[in-house]
Image (cartoon, rainbow, N blue to C red):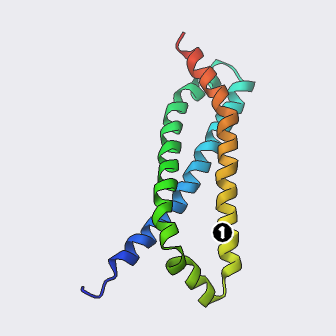
Amino acid sequence: MSGINWTSIIIIINNYFHDLATGLLLSSAVILWVLGRRAEQGGALERLALARAYPTLVRFARGAFAWIILGGIPRTIFFTRYEWDPAVVNGIIPALMVKHVFMVTVIIIGAIMWRRMAKVARAEVEGSDD
């Protein structure tokens, strides 16, 4: 067991969860957007669904965002060794570039969706306390 490179295992797992966190951030934004659109167009049940889901979606989004920031630190530190060098050796630099452009785009789209729908959701949550 002494031949196991635990640093490599930890960094690879971190990078995997970092990618998952990006997807979770976008997923929570999409769910919020769908519920927000339905609340805008629907009745009391749709607004109630948004009011109930909003706090949970916020927790998921905050957790995902925190992991993106915190998990991004070791990912950045070890980027050359665990992502760039293997991409060079395997000739997949364009794929690595597309992946990272896609991930940044996902984060930007997720943030825009959150900003737009958070106003609707907060108004519904505040209105549901009546």
Residue most extreme to the right = 41
Residue type, label 1 = Lys
In the displayed structure, does residue 1 sit left or right of residue 69?
left
| Count of picture labels | 1
Q: Vertical placement of 39 versus 20: above or below?
A: above
Q: Vertical placement of 80 versus 57: above or below?
A: below
Figure quadrant of residue 96: bottom right
**Pointer 1: residues within 10 angstroms few (<14), some, or many (20+)?**
few
Which quadrant, please, contains the C terminus? top right
Percent x, y for residue 93?
Answer: 67, 80
Percent x, y for residue 58?
Answer: 52, 37
Residue sitting at 47 percent across and 60 percent down? 71
Percent x, y for residue 60?
Answer: 49, 43
Q: Vertical placement of 4 versus 55: above or below?
A: below
Percent x, y for residue 42?
Answer: 71, 24
In the displayed structure, does residue 60 sit left or right of residue 38?
left
Which quadrant, please, contains the N terminus? bottom left
Residue sitting at 52 percent across and 49 percent down? 65
In the displayed structure, does residue 47 sit left or right of residue 76?
right
Figure quadrant of residue 51: top right
| Residue under numbered circle 1 | 99
Q: Secondary structure at mark 1?
A: helix
Q: Nearer the viewer, residue 75 or 57?
A: 75
Q: Vertical placement of 42 versus 19: above or below?
A: above
Residue sitting at 65 percent across and 44 percent down? 111
